[in-house]
Image: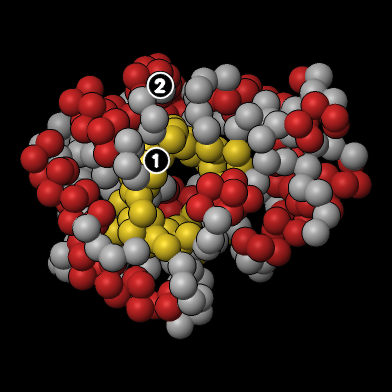
Amino acid sequence: MAQKRYKDYPSFFRTLFRERVQKLSIDGGFTCPNRDGTKGTGGCTFCNNRSFNPDYCRASSSVSAQIAEGKAFFAAKYAGQKYLAYFQAYSGTYAPLGVLKQRYAEALACPGVVGLVIGTRPDTVTDEVLDYLESLARDHYICIEYGVESANDEVLRGVNRCHTFAEAEDAILRTAGRGIRIGAHLIFGLPGENRESMLQGAVRLCALPIDVLKLHQLQIVRGTRMADDYLAHPEGFRLYSLEDYLDFVADVIERIPPRVWLERFVNQSPDEYLIAPRWGVKNFEFTALLDKRLEQRDAWQGKAIGISWEEFLKHE
């Protein structure tokens, strides 16, 4: 296998667990503070949870029932693997601590589950939640994935995110040093962003003590307020072509330190939900194209910030 020119998270997982580990998406029955009126209503303008949750991920089923159904789904494809319970829907820390403890404990009690990945907003993680997750991390793999989305507060306001980048910085710094893996998520192409602000935002985020970075392109998804805006005023949006996005992601990779693991570069909503852009490539196909683009450019993670190829190879 050719040497990757960035630190890919699947390789880290293989090193950490010594066997295949599969995330199982869980709907814990949570909501978000920009949905329930605490900070706002309507949620993020780009968000339709149904577009990225698998069929077995339903809040009407218990956590353990969702895990059992997810395991049955993947067992037909892969044998003898372990699982991470991925609280993906809405904000996975947005509930009283007693409720969170019950949901997380139920997941960890399921056979084959070796840890938790908790997707959430940076403004819904209290110190008492972090204290509890720190205790779990002594015996389990625990990762919090913070939805940062942009480092530009004006952009965050425009998509009704109802938190600031400073709140993301604060949450990440409070999480660091607790034995909890820290993931962060960015969306490239949100209205009001430009190429330079997105590059600067990725650099600012990766200067924080995060372990894992997840990226994806803006997608216009049916059933969202952004879809209504796009259909009414498409001229107000800059959606990436596949070629432009490949080059942009390569630019990002060259500017971030190799201590950060890269888990994902794109997301592909189901065809029945996706309005635009329609690239017609699957995630693994995009990754292959990106690998080729980096090779063509003789680029690697951190090159633009002075990391030599030899230094890059030394990072574990």
Position of the C terminus by quadrant: top right
User: Residue 309 vs residue 141: left or right?
Assistant: right
Q: Residue at x 77, y 20 (%)?
A: 305
Which of discs 1 and 2 lies nearer the camera? The answer is 2
List x then y, in percent, for residue 92. 26, 44
Q: Dividing the picture into quarters, in which one does residue 189 lie?
A: top right
Q: Is residue 240 above or below residue 110?
A: above
User: Residue 266 vs residue 3: left or right?
Assistant: left
At label 1, which amino acid type do we have? Answer: Cys
Position of the N terminus by quadrant: bottom right
Could you tell me how many numbered marks the image carries? 2
Q: Secondary structure at mark 2?
A: loop
Q: Identify the residue position indicated by label 2 in the image.
A: 177
Identity of the residue furthest to the bottom in this view: 76
List x then y, in percent, for residue 39. 20, 30
Q: Residue at x 46, y 72 (%)?
A: 80
Q: Identify the residue position indicated by label 1 in the image.
A: 143
Q: Nearer the viewer, residue 194 or 248?
A: 248
List x then y, in percent, for residue 90. 28, 48
Q: Residue at x 27, y 39 (%)?
A: 136
Q: CA distance from mark 1 to mark 2?
A: 13 Å
List x then y, in percent, for residue 310. 85, 30
At label 2, which amino acid type do we have? Answer: Gly
Cβ–Cβ under 8 Å for marks 1 and 2: no
Using the image, tell me which numbered label, if any, was put on residue 240.
none
Q: Residue at x 71, y 52 (%)?
A: 241
Q: Is residue 78 above or below residue 130?
A: below
Say how the picture is coloured.
secondary structure
Q: Is residue 227 visible?
A: yes
